[in-house]
Amino acid sequence: MTSKLHGTVAIVTGASSGIGDAAARQLASQGARVAVVARRKERLDTLVSSIESDGGTALAVTADITNRAEAEQAVKTVVDRYGRIDILINNAGLMLLGTVLDQDVTDWERMIDINQKGLLYMTSAALPHLLEATTTGPREVADIVNISSYAGRVASPNFATYNMTKFGVNGFTEALRQEVTQKHVRVGVLEPGAVATELKLHNSEAIQQQLAAAEAENIPELLEPDDIADSITFMVTRPRRASIAELWNMPTSQA
Ligand code: NDP
């Protein structure tokens, strides 16, 4: 185990699967105490056990962060337990695909609720603690990494509302970066291309089949969650003077 993040506390949202799970493991392996946040308690408990059996420190925080009070309570739980927050990885998200004509408006609301409001609630609750960590911590710098997407840069049919949520994440991230960077809170956006996770499984069978066919034809080798966790770890382990404002990590096979 290395210790670039020794003495720090990280929160990873959406850590019960995919990118968040991988990121939590990597940050813990760098010495961070990691609070893992999501709704599926059993998954979080398994992750915490696994991190701890590898010698790390982790805390499961079960919360639906689309609920503002639950997001705020999640942050409070972490501060009560560990006394500080140095790193916030806003990763929890949902991708429901379909045309604007056909898609259920409820799907749009669900994506806005988690991809945008959940991120905002967590950021708002954690930011005062991140600012404080810049003067009291081992690194004298704090980090927010917002997980956007390739779909935060490039719009496509069937992705309209997902595109909207992720383009919004990009804009919010850069505005916040400019507000707090001189206070030594680094704020960066990470835009993955296609990653092999559970993300697409929330769609109908028909949409999943369409996606699988498109991926088989156009993206024969997807990224793995660890590829994105590598990027997250890279962003939060730069020297204090260096801030990665944007990082776009694509499968080599994705045009
Ligand atoms: P997963 O579906 O594996 O992970 C999504 C995570 O979000 C789960 O841990 C889920 O946990 C959590 N989550 C969803 N809703 C809530 C909620 N209301 N409250 C708390 N947690 C919630 O997908 P990925 O790992 O792929 O997705 C992670 C991020 O990466 C997302 O923001 C996604 O948009 C982005 N991304 C993914 C890409 C891909 O190809 N996979 C490409 C580009 C970006 P639970 O259900 O237990 O609450």
Image: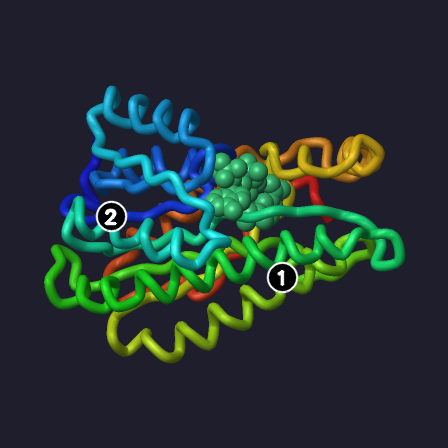
The image shows residue 24 at horizontal and vertical percentages of 36, 38
> From what the image shows, is residue 142 above or below residue 107?
below
Q: Nearer the viewer, mark 2 or mark 1?
A: 2
| 233 displayed left or right of 98 | left
> From what the image shows, is residue 127 above or below residue 24?
below
Please tell me whether mark 2 sits on a helix, a strand or a loop: helix
The residue lying toward the viewer, choosing from 96 and 18, is: 96
Cα separation, mark 2 vs mark 1, equals: 27 Å
The image shows residue 57 at horizontal and vertical percentages of 21, 33
**Image quadrant where residue 36 sits:** top left
Marking on residue 165: 1
Instruction: Tell me the residue that label 2 is attached to.
Output: 78
**Residue type indicated by callout 2:** Val
Residue at position x 49%, y 33% from top? 17
**Residue type indicated by callout 1:** Thr
**Image quadrant where residue 130 sits:** bottom left
Q: Quadrant of the N terminus?
A: top left
Residue at position x 41%, y 25% from top? 42
Residue at position x 34%, y 33% from top? 25
**Image-quarter location of ligand 1:** top right
- Circle 2/circle 1 CB separation < 8 Å: no
Can I make out residue 223 in this image?
A: yes
Please tell me whether mark 1 sits on a helix, a strand or a loop: helix
**Which residue is outermost to the top?**
53
| 89 displayed left or right of 162 | left
Can I make out residue 251 in this image?
A: no
- Mark 2 / mark 1, whichever is N-terminal: 2
**Which residue is outermost to the right?**
101
Residue at position x 37%, y 23% from top? 46
